[in-house]
Amino acid sequence: MSLHNDRPSDDWMDAHIEAYVDGALSPDDQARFEAALHADPTWQDEVKHARSIRASLRSQRPPPLPADLTDAILKRVCVSAPSQKEE
Amino acid sequence: MTAFEQFEQQVHDHKNQVYGFACSLLRDEVTAQDVTQDVFITLWEHREDVDYDRALPWLMRVTRNACIDQLRRRQTRQKTMTVDTEGLSRAESERPLPDTCTEVSDFEDHLNAALDQIDEPYRSVVVLREIQELKYQEIADALDMPLNTVKVYIHRGRKKLRTQLSNRLDYVPA
């Protein structure tokens, strides 16, 4: 436990930041990470930055495939193998 | 259910994920549409080999391979086109890079541009996880990697993206 009272290294913080943002750290590691976080504005900014990236990526919704493309795929299959359609 | 009906169902279930993944890798909707068509035709041709319930990882693997082929062709074309114009050749994306772009303004533009600069397989891993929201095991199946490798690559890919974006935004931690 005393190890958890030591300030973690930057390498340790760097290795755990993504899991922290994911909420995937063990309770011990989360407590250790957050203790260091409160004491270090650099890591606060890094966490904020990582969260912005995550939120922005997850909000991206590429456009759906146009409906005529779906029809084109099915037609191509029918044309290439008409007998298979009734399998 | 006939083979065609199964195929039709798979097209409807997965077409937007295939197309979305291709769009994310190619940044070109027209080429992504061509890739999507070809991927599903390939699925039909290999329908005997693809487990119906595991079609999504298979589709993502074929989509990624097709996109990588397209990106290589694009690079080759660009190198050919710029052989006499040293310094104008761009990397994978057809989108302008920051040094040639005057109006890359919002965060998402920077983020996508940063994503385009990440090398494979990290880029695919990040896209599959963060945009397509695949499970770790689905990514492992799609990329034919052990599960633990996927976890490591997701971490590394996110870190690369964070670093790349910081550089682009001239982000300086306090």
Image (cartoon, coloured by chain):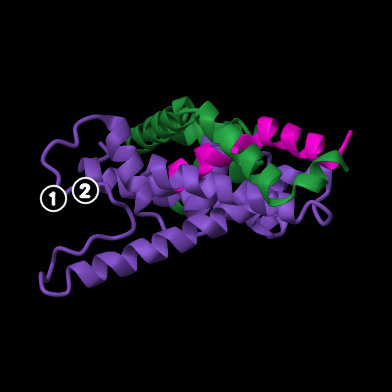
Chain colours: A green, B purple
Secondary structure of the magenta portion, mostly?
helix
- State which chain disc 1 sits on: B
Q: Nearer the viewer, residue B27 or A15?
A: B27
The quarter of the picture where the C terminus of chain A appears is top right
Left or right: where B154 falls relative to B87: right
Q: Are marks 2 and 1 in contact (CB under 8 Å)?
A: yes
Q: Position of residue B93 (x, y in %)?
A: 32, 52
Q: Quadrant of residue B82?
A: bottom left
Could you say which is closer to the camera, residue A48 or residue B69?
A: B69
Question: Measuring 69% from the left and 31% from the top, which residue is drawn there?
Answer: B13
Looking at the rendering, the stretch of residues picked out in magenta corresponds to: B1-25
- Which residue sits furthest bottom? B83
Q: Pointer 2: residues within 10 angstroms few (<14), some, or many (20+)?
A: some
Residue indicated by mark 1: B100
Asked if marks 2 and 1 fall on the same chain, the answer is yes
**Magenta stretch holds residue B110:** no
| Quadrant hosting residue B76 | bottom left
Q: Residue B9: x, y in percent?
A: 75, 32
Residue linked to disc 2: B96
User: Per the image, is B9 magenta?
Assistant: yes
Q: Amino acid at mark 2?
A: Pro
Q: Position of residue B8 (x, y in %)?
A: 73, 34
Q: What distance separates the C-alpha of mark 2 from that of mark 1?
A: 6 Å
Q: Quadrant of the N terminus of chain A?
A: top right
